[in-house]
Amino acid sequence: MSAPGAGHEFPRKDVSWQKRDVLLFANSIGAKVDELHFLYELHPKFSVFPTYPLILPFKLTDQEVTDFYARQEATHIPGVPKLDYRHAVDGQRKLTILKPLPPTSAGRKFELRNTVVGVYDKGKPGTVIETEQAIIDKETGEAYSKVLSSGFLVGQGGWGGPKGPSTENFPPPEGKAPDAVHVVQTSPETAHLYRLNGDYNPLHATPEPGQKLGFGGTIIHGLFSWNSAAHGLLRELGGSDPANMKEFQARFAAPVRPGDKLTTEIWRTGNAQPDGFEEVRFVTKNQNGKVVLSNGRSLLKVVGTKSKL
């Protein structure tokens, strides 16, 4: 039996980006000056950071600030009760990179195709919505990326839907020191920079929504932590070469607060595919040792810390 809403496709939406958007994204997730191919548009190998597709469902074609709540409320899934997206938090994301995005969409036409995988009732804690979002070249039909996403709507369960399948776990190896470590020091303004990519959820800008949700105030975007961890893996093991990342996923385990220090511990597994990509696992913790990103897994071409292009 399929889950409620499974197969429902939301209206397709155009997406676009400029080189300036690519530069802003790389800056906001912590790209360094020795990675100029992400930070300087005239670099001979100027590239889009490979996880940028995750921001396009928020940004679409906009270059101006948008009303996050109004945009979310416009979506409805048949067979599922109306849900309040003001109480939504991220659950998990898995990105599969099929083809690198060009540095700008100018002269091309791209669209977002967003399909429901299932909607699951977790009882009193809330409801999980799982979707697959693809970035598609409208003229050729070619897919550039696919993202399997789950969102958790706090306190909106108990409507009689299925609980849903259990998720596969990718724990780090036991008793083995990490092969690499990447540290990010956030600031009180980290979320205010990251939100300029197009993710304007007030939860990350002002304390009132977080107080209502029980977080005690402002929290940083889960996708900032997710994307900055992706940058850490690519920098520490992939030589900062965007071609060396094929998949990246993590579960949002705990909120990150402005000023937190995030440490990502990274392990090679030795499980290499015929195409040279190796499974790498990771976990991200805050300064108190609390896990904020779990279930971390990526497919990387591991080249160590070679020069950054």
Image: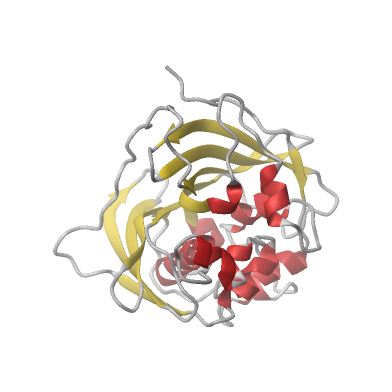
Is any atom of residue 128 visible in this view? Answer: yes
Q: Quadrant of the C terminus?
A: bottom right
- Relative horizontal placement of residue 166, taking residue 259 as reference (left or right): left
Q: Which of these two is toward me, 98 or 83?
A: 83
Q: Which of these two is toward me, 171 or 90?
A: 90
Name the residue rendered at 73%, 33% in the picture: 11
Quadrant in the rendering for residue 49:
bottom right
Residue furthest right in the image: 107
Number of numbered discs visible in the structure rendering: 0
Residue 64 x/y as whole percent: 81, 63
Is any atom of residue 37 visible in this view? Answer: no
Q: Quadrant of the N terminus?
A: top left
Quadrant in the rendering for residue 267:
bottom left
- Relative horizontal placement of residue 180, taking residue 129 as reference (left or right): left
Residue 13 x/y as whole percent: 75, 41
Name the residue rendered at 55%, 38% in the picture: 132
Q: Which of these two is toward me, 230 or 196?
A: 196
Name the residue rendered at 55%, 80% in the picture: 32
Residue 184 x/y as whole percent: 45, 78
Quadrant in the rendering for residue 83:
top right
Q: How is the image coloured?
A: secondary structure
Name the residue rendered at 67%, 38% in the picture: 75
Residue furthest top in the image: 1
